[in-house]
Image (cartoon, coloured by chain):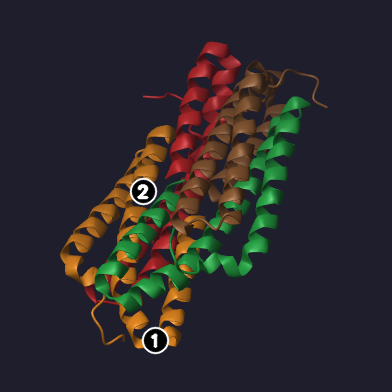
Chain colours: A orange, B red, C brown, D green
């Protein structure tokens, strides 16, 4: 466990309610498939859920930079280097997903 | 309602199980936030869920092209035009999400 | 060579001028690196050039669906199937790039 | 001008040659349109150029985090805050483009 305060914890409840809403969106998409709705309408909902997930990711990333990375930077280059590499890899995964 | 057979219906059960899995992934992400897990680990799971959603969308789109669009093309240009415009807009939303 | 009329040819000149502009944008990005400009400003230009390229791709795809795919659909399922698979793969590459 | 050393300058020549190659790719795409090549083949080249541009962006971003942001973090929270906000906005543009 990381013994410091993750940036996103300041908005923990907001993130939890956003994620519950996205979970509901995905359940709704499954129901549309169950009810054999029109493909394009289902695709519209998938794009909305994907965008919502990406917004959560961008928020978490911003919080991570402003807490974990910033704290590490104050401890010196080695600690910061590790955090920054992690952040860069997470950004690359996000851009490619 | 569209009185014809949507392409995705051939794989309806597979889509339903994939969507249930993605729903579980999103629930898992919420649990990681609840348990205050490390930001980067949560981001990794969000990228995985986003990619899974996009794969479902690409499958649905392929099914749509091979059924709804193909059927419309056989009815003539006007019917096809409408379907093709819908498909192009759905593709644009997918690329931009 | 495909002996039919590609959809994009109706807007050939427009596509050529858009691509020349994007070429100029990339050259401008190189000049910013040459002149050692601020990273964030260079990133802004790269996002703009990437979006411009994606818009050209979406236009070409729309034209392809409305010409090559539509023509193939009229020739029957086998011809259409090949075109539709090509289109789906191109869409997947675009979504993942 | 920013009186400090941008991260990307360590690889300045490599970035310049990558950008020249991408410029050549875009010129090549224009030539394919000029020569009325098949749409799907053009789309394949656009996806390749887009991916190449994103890779340059991810490299610049990594360099930025490891230099500008890291230096700012050492100067204190306010300086770091500004840089981190800039980085987050650049990441959001990259993810959405």
Circle 2 SS class? helix
Which class describes the residues within 10 Å of circle 2: few (<14), some (14-19), or many (20+)?
some
> x and y percent of residue B12 in the render?
46, 45
Q: Which comes before the other along the chain, label 2 or label 1?
A: 2
Quadrant where the C terminus of chain B sits is top left
Pointer 1 local density, CA inside 10 Å: few below 14, some 14–19, many at least 20: few
Q: Judging from the image, what secondary structure is the residue with disc 1 in?
A: loop
Residue receiving disc 2: A51
**Res. C43 in view:** yes
Closer mark to the observer between disc 2 and disc 1: 1
Instruction: Give the labeled residue for mark 1.
Output: A76
Q: Picture quarter containing residue B70?
A: top right
Residue D81 appears left or right of A97:
left
Q: Quadrant of the N terminus of chain B?
A: top left
C62 above or below D29?
A: above
Q: Looking at the image, which residue is at 24% across and 77% down? A: B35
Chain of the residue displaying label 2: A
Q: Is residue D41 left or right of residue C97?
A: right
* Residue at position x 26%, y 59% in the image: A19
x, y percent for residue B50:
43, 56
Q: Nearer the viewer, residue D51 or B46?
A: D51
Asked if labels 2 and 1 share a chain, the reply is yes
Q: Chain of mark 1?
A: A
User: Percent position (x, y) of residue C17?
Assistant: 63, 26
Q: CA distance from mark 2 to mark 1?
A: 36 Å
In this picture, is B78 found above or below D86? above
Q: Position of residue C21 (x, y in %)?
A: 60, 33
Residue C73 appears in the rendering? no
**In the image, is B57 to the left or to the right of C83?**
left
Rendered residue at 28%/66% (across/down): D81
């Amino acid at each position: 466990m990381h013994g410091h305060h993750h940036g996103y914890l300041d908005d923990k409840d907001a993130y939890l309610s956003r994620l519950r809403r996205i979970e509901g969106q995905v359940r709704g998409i499954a129901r549309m498939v169950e009810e054999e709705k029109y493909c394009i309408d289902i695709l519209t909902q998938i794009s909305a859920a994907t965008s919502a997930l990406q917004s959560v990711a961008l928020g978490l990333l911003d919080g991570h930079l402003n807490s974990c990375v910033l704290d590490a930077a104050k401890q010196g280059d080695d600690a910061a280097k590790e955090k920054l590499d992690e952040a860069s890899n997470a950004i690359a995964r996000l851009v490619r997903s």
